[in-house]
Amino acid sequence: MGLSEQQVRFFETFGYLSFPGAFADEAEAISEEFERVWAERGGGHEGRAHDHKQRSAFVPFIDQSEYLSRLIDDPRINGVAAALLGDDYNYETSDGNFYVGDTRWHSDGFARTKYRFLKFAFYLDPVTAESGCLRVIPGSHHRRDGYANELHRLMSTSRVDQTESALGVPGPEVPAVALETRPGDLIMFNQDLKHASYGGGTRRRMFTINVSERFDDEDLDTLRNDVASLVRFWAESAYGDAMVRTAGPERMVHLEQRIANDDHLPGLVAKAREEMSEPARG
């Protein structure tokens, strides 16, 4: 599945795309595999049962399953990523989540490098504006735009929701598009885009697949720093075993650059384990 010229223009302008029903036929199987992966590791964060009070997160996630790893090869993912990032794009990582409550307005690393990063989001339960669906602020991904940069300044000063003190409105009232979804729908957005969710329950199932442009050779130090963002999740390699073990030549194009630049992770993770009581929850 590629993208039409209109879809590319929409994405470039607003920073997101929605694909209703893209995985409708596989929705039940994907959900079952999601649950199986979590069950194998205790049902929640760091091998403990999900307590419905804090977000449970697991990174990298789809890498733990041969079935979910194959999503990287699927034309509905691969075709979109290649159309926007080039055929040699990198698979960055993935995260599996049981979300709890609200998620404040944020970006996943606004302009952290000169390269473009995209996120594919799979919500495994029906979600609406009132029950925790993804909300986005269209156009807030434009790095050189004064509007986007001012939003970033106002909304990203801490992990506390700043919108009421900065803008005079609570987070749910910020003008935005609520992307309501059902299982089998797919959402893709630029990771610089401001996004949030409000009103959700205590076990919202969602996982993402994150991809980026391939880094130029002169920027490999920057890539290594980006790979090191996995340290807070106690990930000792760029990818999980199933992702690499089942990779054919076409998938390896999207893995090879980060594999070649992840040798520093074990040492950094060993230090992180001494300093952190548990891996990060997001």
Image (cartoon, rainbow, N blue to C red):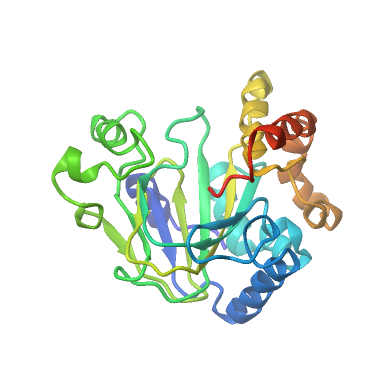
The x and y percentages for residue 176 are: 25, 55
When the figure is inspected, residue 152 is found, relative to residue 185, above or below; the finding is above
- Residue at position x 45%, y 62% from top? 100
Tell me if 44 is positioned left or right of 151 in this view.
Answer: right
When the figure is inspected, residue 19 is found, relative to residue 28, above or below; the finding is above
Q: Quadrant of the N terminus?
A: bottom right
- Residue at position x 71%, y 67% from top? 37
- In the picture as drawn, the residue positioned furthest to the top comes out as 218
Q: How many marks?
A: 0
Front position in the image: 9 or 181: 181
- Which quadrant holds residue 42? bottom right
Tell me if 37 is positioned left or right of 245 in this view.
Answer: left
When the figure is inspected, residue 68 is found, relative to residue 174, above or below; the finding is below
- In the picture as drawn, the residue positioned furthest to the left comes out as 168
The x and y percentages for residue 223 are: 64, 28
The x and y percentages for residue 152 are: 31, 35
When the figure is inspected, residue 241 is found, relative to residue 141, above or below; the finding is below
Front position in the image: 108 or 252: 108
- Which quadrant holds residue 88? top right
- Residue at position x 55%, y 55% from top? 80
The x and y percentages for residue 186 are: 49, 66
Front position in the image: 112 or 76: 112
- In the picture as drawn, the residue positioned furthest to the right comes out as 245
